[in-house]
Amino acid sequence: MSLNESGIEIDASLTIVEGDIELSADIIPIPALEDFDTINLMEDYLICSFDSTLHETKREYKYAANNVTLPSLVSCAGQWAEDYVWYFDFNEIQYDLVKTLLDEKGITYQVPNEIGMILGKLN
Amino acid sequence: MIQEERRKIFKKAWVNSIKKDLYPKYINGSNVAFNYFYTELSQLLWPENNISDELNFDEYEKSGSVKIRAMKNDMEALGSPIIPFQNQALENLVKGDLVVLIIENEILLRKLGSRIVSFIYLGDNLLMDACMGSVINWLDWKENPEWMPRLLFYINVAASTENDIKYMHKGDKWYRPYDKKDKIIWEDFWRTI
């Protein structure tokens, strides 16, 4: 559970402990789910991201094992990425429980749309 | 389909895709001309019963190149699975496949957010970039010391036609190509491109 191959995605995990959501990763600090601007609820993972146009300060992350700081992303050459995308994997049998807990906490999330897509939409 | 027809269709889809995506619409946008190229091509090959003219790629422009899992989900919704490269060669691809690679020069690109770049495979190791503006030869370009590219995965756009299972639809309009008849047309189009 660490920095993904793309270098801009972080693989992390989500478990249910004593009826509540617990997040874990090799990278710290792990943002609270409430902090993300966009959350996509999938069958066995969450896609969590920030809209960098809404935030003035950048988050800084480190590897928990050695305290090495992850590169602070900047946009360049027409490509935009100012923050990392977090994936929280969970056991798919816990999908309903995760959904219920997100609802109880009032956390806004999106599920795949009517054509089964996340990014692709119909006009 | 004769060669002149293929040329006209390709050129029309190419020109229209560039017109639609000469510049990203959003401040945080990336070029997605290749998305428009696929939909334009789909419309030109199958003008009827085709959902592609209703597809909206705004979110792809904003975050498609950084949300690989979201992209993977969407490709699976089209019936087009992501196939990882087993080695650094464009083997087993067919013309029209979407190729995704990562650029890895840690010194020059250490802070660059999006290292994922997409191309359309044109056959003979030729790749057209996502902006639809240039074509590279992979055999030469893979040695590029500035970018240090590495093949990640490819997507067979017409994969869903193999089993005749129709995937994404809205009412009676479908994503195409979607069956074996479409596959014949798709392959015939790309055959001499």
Image (cartoon, rainbow, N blue to C red):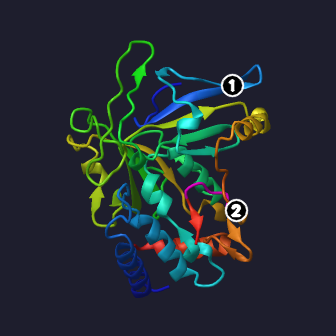
Q: What residue type is labelled 2?
A: Glu
| Residue situated furthest top in the rendering | A66
Q: How far apart are marks 2 and 1 (CA)?
A: 28 Å
Query: Which element is circle 2 on?
Result: loop
Does the image show residue B94?
A: no
Q: Mark 2 points at which residue?
A: A114
Q: Give the main secondary structure, helix, strand or loop, of the magenta stretch.
A: loop
In the rendered structure, find residue A55 and report the number of the disc placed on it.
none
Which residue matches tag 1?
A15
Exactly how many numbered labels are in the figure?
Answer: 2
Say above or below: B132 vs B79.
Answer: below
Q: Which chain carries label 2?
A: A
Coordinates of residue B165 in the picture (x, y in percent)? 73, 63
**Segment colored magenta:** A114-119
Residue A116 among magenta residues? yes
**Residue B66 belongs to magenta span:** no
Which sits in the foreground, B186 or B111?
B111
Quadrant, the C terminus of chain B = bottom left
Please name the residue shown 45% across and 64% down the image.
B95
